C-alpha cells in the first residue's frame, strides 16, 4: 500500500496560461466576419412577397441589384405603392440613372451579367410593375428576376 501525503491538498492551483488568448479572439472574430452578412440598405417600404411554385436561388448575389416596391413604412408618406432604390424612395423615371450608377460600380466584364431583382408586394398593381419593366428596358437592364417565397405546392 502506498502512503498518502497530507501536503498534497495544500498545493496551489497553477496560473492560467493566456498566451494563446489573442489567437482565439482573432479566430472567433474572423469566423463572425466570414459568416455574418451585413444588410446593405434599410427598408423603407413594406412588402409581402408572393408565393411561387418554381423558385430558384440567384447564383452571384454580388451582381444583383434590388428594386423594392411596396407601401411605405412611414404613414406620413402615404399609403400608395412606392418604389425604393437603395435607401431612398424614387419614381419610375429615376430607374435609368440608378441602373447606370449600379452598372458603373461593377467590373466591365460583369456588367453584362447584372440582374435586377424586383421585390414587389403581392398586392402591387401589374401596371406599376410594367412601368418599371419598361424603364429597365430603356436602361438596357434586360435580365430581370422576381423575388418570391416558396409556395406550399
Image (cartoon, rainbow, N blue to C red):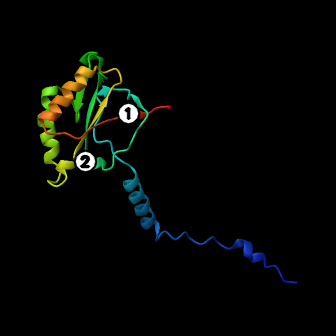
The answer to which image quadrant residue 58 occupies is top left
Residue 28: give x, y in percent of width and height.
44, 59
Query: Secondary structure under badge 1?
Result: loop
Crowding around mark 2 (Cα neighbors within 10 Å: few <14, some 14 to 19, many 20+) is: some
In the rendered view, tell whether residue 141 sits above or below residue 78.
below
Tell me which residue sits at (71%, 72%) in the image.
Answer: 10
Identify the residue shown where x is 16% and y is 48%: 105
Answer with the quarter of the image where residue 64 lies: top left
Q: Decide: is 143 above or below 94.
A: below
In the picture of the structure, the residue carrying the numbered disc 2 is 63
In the figure, 67 relative to 76: above or below? below
Residue under the image location 41 percent in, 34 percent down: 149
Task: Residue 65: give x, y in percent of width and height.
Answer: 24, 41
Picture disc at residue 125: none
Quadrant of the snapshot with the N terminus: bottom right
Q: Quick one: which residue is furthest to the right in this view?
A: 1
Instruction: Specify which label sits upstream in the sequence, 2 or 1.
Output: 2
In the displayed structure image, the side of residue 72 where residue 28 appears, left or right: right
Tell me where residue 15 appears, x and y as whole percent. Answer: 56, 70
Residue in front for this viewpoint, 17 or 75: 75
* Lateral position of residue 146 relative to residue 133, left or right: right
Within 10 angstroms of label 1, few (less than 14), some, or many (20 or more) residues? many
Vertical relation: 18 (above or below) 130: below
Q: CA distance from mark 2 to mark 1?
A: 18 Å
- Residue 83 at what x, y percent from top left? 23, 27
Q: Nearer the viewer, residue 132 or 44?
A: 132
Residue corresponding to mark 1: 148
Amino acid at each position: 500500500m502506498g502512503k498518502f501525503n497530507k501536503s498534497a491538498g495544500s498545493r496551489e492551483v497553477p496560473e492560467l496560461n493566456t498566451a494563446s488568448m489573442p489567437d482565439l479572439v482573432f479566430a472567433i472574430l474572423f469566423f463572425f466576419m466570414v459568416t455574418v452578412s451585413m444588410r446593405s440598405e434599410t427598408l423603407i417600404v413594406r412588402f409581402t412577397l408572393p408565393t411561387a411554385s418554381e423558385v430558384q436561388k440567384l447564383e452571384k448575389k454580388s451582381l444583383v441589384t434590388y428594386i423594392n416596391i411596396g407601401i411605405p413604412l412611414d404613414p406620413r408618406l402615404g399609403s400608395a405603392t412606392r418604389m425604393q432604390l437603395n435607401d431612398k424612395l424614387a419614381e419610375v423615371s429615376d430607374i435609368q440613372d440608378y441602373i447606370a450608377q449600379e452598372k458603373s460600380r461593377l467590373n466591365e466584364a460583369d456588367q453584362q451579367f447584372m440582374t435586377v431583382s424586383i421585390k414587389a408586394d403581392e398586392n402591387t398593381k401589374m401596371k406599376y410593375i410594367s412601368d418599371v419593366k419598361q424603364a429597365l428596358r430603356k436602361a438596357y437592364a434586360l435580365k430581370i428576376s422576381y423575388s418570391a417565397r416558396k409556395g406550399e405546392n
